[in-house]
Amino acid sequence: MKHYNAEEKNKIVELILNKEKTIKELASESEDSPSVGTIARWKKEYLSQGPYVDDNNNDAIPSWSGYSYQGKVAILCVLEKINELNNLSELDGWAIQLEKVQDFIFFKDKEIVSLWQVKAMLSSVRYQSYVNTMDKLLEDKSRTGFLDAKCYLVAAVDITNWNDEDNAYKDNIHLYMRDERAVTIKEVSNEIKKEIGDLINQIGITVDEEAAYLNLCYLIDKKVSEFHQAGKKDNYLISFTEIIKQIEETEAFEKRISELRIKESIYQNICEKIQGGISSYCEDCEKRENGSCDPGYCAINRNNELVGGVDVQNYMKSIRPEIEKDIDYTINHPEDYSDTICYSIRTAPAIAMQQENDIISVTCYNGKINVIPTMLDLSRGTERRLSKTLEAVEKNEWLKSNIGRKILVGNTQNVIFGTELTKFTNIRLNDLLKGEEVDNTKNIGVKYFTERIDEKASTVHNSIIVIDREQLINYFGEDDE
């Protein structure tokens, strides 16, 4: 059998998931085709661990951001190190490398001082969940040849059994903590500001701490973009002196800081909602209670990883599509994120979730459609409110130009809404997946929302469709795949 790369394996598995071909059909296509057993194993691994990635492709830089947990932890640890040195003359030769071998690496005069892995697995509170990560950390250290370098694991939750006698990793890997606690996805921003306060006192300058913090987030975003454009041949290094310079120049960028304050507020809001979702959905999880929680199967962890890879302002536009311009309202009056989004994503197979073009979607493989979980709630509105909400979604130019063929999902009392002419119908999700669509001429107006709906539609011309969250959950529950 010939060697199949990651892309070829993914294509074969997706043919099966989309029910375009069976395993037997694929195995019998030619003499070089993989066996039935091999394809079955690929499918199982794909569903449990996600799409295959070539072994030499460790470049996750496109998803890095100053507005992701990884990016913020990198900033925090650099500032800690600068303050630890306590002498700006000692900064020469110090640099941080982002996402080249590990999440980040500290260099001193081109020699590796420490390697860092950052994991925001919010439901994983036992060290066993991080074994694969720690194995890779130690393996990569060995490959670098810098055997005296230290290894650090950064977790966004407290690992409750780290000091157990059977944890052999604790002798070779340092668990990063501040004040003997993990730094959460929400707390990391304030911890950075504390380090900035100490640093500007050391430098002897007067700079607003929050503004300096936002400017460092901007620096990470800018450098990540430059790294990505340059490609893998770039060294992905940011010198510590460049970090200091960015702080010193903060006051010269007042307009930029104003825009970044909005972005930071959205980040904090989303983090709060995600953590709320974790608390409510994980407390009764049997796997977590018995210590067998596997982050590879945890959709809530996957959701958090996906959020960390998108532009937070654009993400807010997709989960609150009825609010296009008033960002302050979006932040100050959020719907229940955990109820309307986390539950849908938890129910969906982890492999069905993806992040693309700053939005998160859930793929219905059998029907070949993608839906975007949103905080739309059309289930209890009056005729006027429903009409205005749908009209607002229809007018959201960013949404229309970015969602493509994807469909929104919200709370709609098991009906399907179409934004054009503010109509809706009771067409079944399975019919929509099969290509049956909503026909405007047969739609029932919003004013009949509370009455029984018997009419079934056949074709659609709506520009945006909203399906019910419960329908999506039920669909995944019934799906054999």
Image (spheres, grey):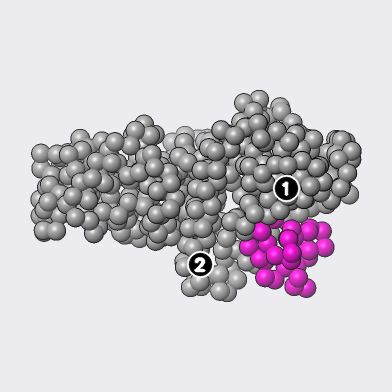
Q: Secondary structure at mark 1?
A: helix
Please tell me which residue is depicted at 49% across the width and 63% down the height of the picture. Answer: 276
Asked whether the viewer can see residue 404, the reply is: no
Disc on res. 136: none
Q: Quadrant of the C terminus?
A: bottom left
Where residue 103 sits: x, y (%)? Answer: 69, 45
Give, as a single range, the part of the protein colored magenta: 154-183
Disc on res. 196: 1
Gap between marks 1 and 2, in whole Å?
A: 31 Å
User: Viewer-proximal residue, 148 or 392?
Assistant: 392
Where residue 114 sits: x, y (%)? Answer: 81, 47
User: Viewer-proximal residue, 159 or 353?
Assistant: 159
Q: Are marks 1 and 2 in contact (CB under 8 Å)?
A: no
- Taking the magenta stretch, the answer to whether it contains residue 12 is no
- Taking the magenta stretch, the answer to whether it contains residue 165 is yes
Mark 1 vs 2, N-terminal side:
1
Q: Is residue 73 left or right of residue 386?
A: right
Q: Name above or below for residue 161 compared with residue 60.
A: below
Q: Quadrant of the N terminus?
A: top right
Q: Secondary structure at mark 2?
A: helix
- Residue occupied by mark 2: 279
Please tell me which residue is depicted at 54% across the width and 52% down the height of the picture. Answer: 268
Residue lying farthest to the top in this orientation = 230
Residue 335, located in which quarter of the rendered image? bottom left
Please tell me which residue is depicted at 34% across the width and 33% down the height of the picture. Answer: 397
Residue lying farthest to the front in this orientation = 206
Count the marks: how many? 2
Mark 1, other Cα within 10 Å: few <14 / some 14–19 / many ≥20: many
**Mark 1 or mark 2, which is nearer to you?**
1
